[in-house]
Image: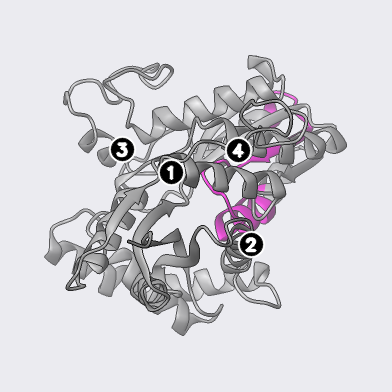
Amino acid sequence: MPTPKKGLLLVNLGTPDGPESGPVRRYLREFLSDPRVLDLHPAARWLLLNFIILPTRPAKSAEAYQKVWMKEGSPLLVHSRALEAAVAERLRGEYEVELAMRYGNPSLPDAVKALRSRGVKEFILLPLYPQEAASSSSSTLARAYEVLAEHWDVPAVRTVPAFHDHPGFLDAFAAVARPVIAEARAEHVLFSYHGLPERHMRKSDPSGRHCLASAGCCEVLTDVNRHCYRAQCFATTRALAERLELPRERYTVSFQSRLGRTPWIKPYTDLVLPELAKQGVKRLAVMCPAFVADCLETLEEVGLRARDQFLECGGESLTLVPSLNSHPAWVDSVVRLVREADGAAPENEPGTGLPKSPMPGL
């Protein structure tokens, strides 16, 4: 019998179709209607969304999007499309490749339909989130499984797990960051991750006793917190700092993008910035390793707003380290992640018989 045709579904979070209030409102409505994002009673979520968030937030968000919107479209979509094309070229003859967004376009149903129309019988799902969280990876997987289950013949599915500690991801981010940090002559590196409400962390604690119970609960990954988003962020930071040869006093971890009045995981990026300036840091580099593609949260929130805040507090420069986007080392790593998840042996370096490194010279 012929081998079933395989498809690779690359999934990122999503972006509005345009930088105006209308498209932003549609995007926010879909995004914030997800019970894994706004985990409130349905009635409370509906009231908050329709009477507080949607009347005011779209105009503010649209203004922010307009500052970073590219000629080709949303930065997240543009960079994700470039990654899709590069990965498809590398996997030509092995996998059909499609990009989807959890919210907005290209939608998961459309991407699955496109792959099915090309004869795909087996799926590999790669959620493009390094650290796992219910509001990103779990929501994406739940929706993808739901879409695939709508077909009469449900296809076989394999999932690439969170890759916060995968050597390919870490080596690729270090390769992007190293020359930028050097050129900026950065005295300090801030690792700024997307924040989440503290209640999300506690819901993911199987013991009900460990999460946020002490100041150092996320400093080491254990069986109890192995799936904790915050602990995985700290693990990513330690691994990147080691690759970048950053001593502990030269880097800080923080969390950005908090919304509302409930406590979010700390420390907060906008409160850490003035503290660093007060400590005498003049040249700061910021890495955002929760994002594999530059987007509103990196380009506008950090590259513009955080930079202005740091300069106002006495800093001399804040340099945003670009995300992975479609960097060749990241393309290599995506290919490696897919093949490993699919049970394939890694490529070997020619003439060595040893597994191929995701980056030349490593």
Instruction: Name the residue beneath numbered marker 4.
Output: 347
Q: Earlier in the sequence, mark 4 or mark 2?
A: 2
Q: Amino acid under label 3?
A: Glu
Q: Is 275 left, or right, of 266 in this rendering?
A: right
Q: Earlier in the sequence, mark 2 or mark 3?
A: 2
Instruction: Name the residue beneath numbered marker 1.
Output: 195
Instruction: Name the residue beneath numbered marker 3.
Output: 198
Disc 2 to disc 3: CB gap under 8 Å: no
Disc 1 to disc 2: CB gap under 8 Å: no
Q: Earlier in the sequence, mark 1 or mark 2?
A: 2
Q: Amino acid under label 4?
A: Glu
- Tell me residue 312's x, y (percent): 72, 45
Judging from the image, what secondary structure is the residue with disc 4 in?
loop
Instruction: Name the residue beneath numbered marker 2.
Output: 89
Q: Is 39 left, or right, of 316 in this rendering?
A: left
How many residues crowd around disc 1 within 10 Å: few (fewer than 14), some, or many (20 or more)? many
Q: Nearer the viewer, residue 270 or 19?
A: 19
Q: What numbered label is drawn on residue 1?
A: none
Q: Which residue corresponds to the image point at 41% horizontal and 77% vertical from the top-left?
A: 114
Can you see residue 48?
A: no
Q: Earlier in the sequence, mark 1 or mark 4?
A: 1
Mark 2 or mark 3: which is in front?
Answer: 2
Q: Quadrant of residue 315?
A: top right
Give the residues in magenta: 277-306
Magenta-drawn stretch contains 62: no
Q: CA distance from mark 1 to mark 4?
A: 36 Å
How many residues crowd around disc 4 within 10 Å: few (fewer than 14), some, or many (20 or more)? some
